[in-house]
Amino acid sequence: MSVLSVKVFQSLVYRIRDILDCDVDITDSNGVVFASTRQNAIGSYSDEALDFLDSNEDFSESENAAFMKVGKRGSLDFVAVVYGEIQQRKKAMELVCLSIENARLYYEEKFDKNSFIKNVVLGNILPGDISLRAKELRVKDDVRRIIYSIHTEKSRDIHAYNIIQSLFPNESKDFVVLLDDQNTVLVKELKDKEQEDDIYRKARIIIDTLNTELMVKASVGIGTEVTRLRDISRSYKDAQTALAIGKIFETDKDIVDYNHLGIGRLIYQLPTTLCKLFLNEVFKDNVYEHIDQETMITIKKFFENSLNVSETSRQLFVHRNTLVYRLDKIQKLTGMDLRNFEDAMLFKVAMMVKRYLDETSR
């Protein structure tokens, strides 16, 4: 039990005493008193509480005290003990236990490290309060960190959260935050010598492990490296942006790094009206819609092979002359010769703009 949580519960027992006019203890699941209005009782074992813990009862009374178990999700966490004679003792104990539950929720919300990090990631804490809270929780402020935003398919059995937490069990340095059943965030502390390759390798481990353990597909967005806690929310937004851009322009990739988004970053930030004007300028009379599937596959393969006719024809299993014929056909339709670097570059950008517009219109 941390010092902070003891303070929360110690304050609570004094307030209960003022209301009920009787002494109150709270013990842990081992019968150790950690909060009490009786100062000499703190830190001692309560024999009566131990006997009560061994019983199957949730509520018990003796001549001098009443006992009630306090738990969450089927687990036993505390025992509340109220001394003296009070009217409607069981009802009073239920209210005491409710107060303990609320105090625990307050503590977890305000002081739990994971809740704190989650609120920092989502930008729910004022920047000026972050360093103060970090000191209270003994969370390092000025260390190298990176954000991994992990998106998975829905799984019936177990969240990706549990798998990722098992991969990075050092809770004093790494924080795994569950956002919902498909999105998890890993706030990873970086060692001094860790570089880009190491960061990417960890993302690959996450994806491969999720695929092996859960049999689900996953994608990871890598944010920018930060050195202060207050910048974690920015890194998270960058990781989210990387996932969004990757979904449009890098559909074949399951790891997308915000620092390597290329021209997709520029297109993603452009207004759709400007994109439409550009597309109408490149593909006059809506000629893009007249390009058939076979021709589009040819174009993509031609770009993949850096405009190399021989290599493209080999990979497509067609004669070189057949490929040249298709390229001539594209030139006649669009007015652009894809064997020319400038035309090819213009066509490639226009394809990406078209994909972006199609995605945003859904």
Image: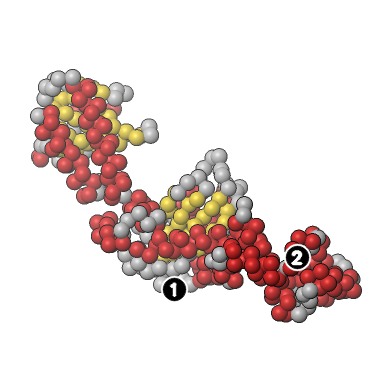
Give the quadrant of residue 290: bottom right
Residue 341 - label: none
Q: Depth check: 110 or 344 in front? A: 344
Q: Which residue is found at the position 32% from the left and 33% from the top?
A: 71
Horizontal side, residue 122 vs residue 86: left or right: right
Mark 2 or 1, closer to the camera: 2
Label 2 belongs to which residue?
Answer: 285
Amino acid type for the residue under numbered disc 2: Asp
Q: Which residue is found at the position 28% from the left and 32% from the top?
A: 70
Give the quadrant of residue 323: bottom right
Q: Is residue 170 visible?
A: no
Q: Is residue 102 visible?
A: yes
Horizontal side, residue 184 vs residue 312: left or right: left
Amino acid type for the residue under numbered disc 1: Lys
User: Is residue 105 positioned above or below 122 on the image?
Assistant: above
* Color scheme of the displayed model: secondary structure
The spot of residue 219 in percent (x, y) is: 57, 56
Horizontal side, residue 87 vs residue 134: left or right: left
* Residues packed near mark 2 inside 10 Å, few (<14), some (14 to 19) or many (20 plus): few
Label 1 belongs to which residue?
Answer: 193
Q: Secondary structure at mark 2?
A: helix
* Residues packed near mark 1 inside 10 Å, few (<14), some (14 to 19) or many (20 plus): few
User: Is residue 187 positioned above or below 22 on the image?
Assistant: below
Give the quadrant of residue 10: top left
The spot of residue 173 in percent (x, y) is: 37, 60
Q: Secondary structure at mark 1?
A: loop
The spot of residue 165 in percent (x, y) is: 45, 52
User: Is residue 255 positioned above or below 89 on the image?
Assistant: below
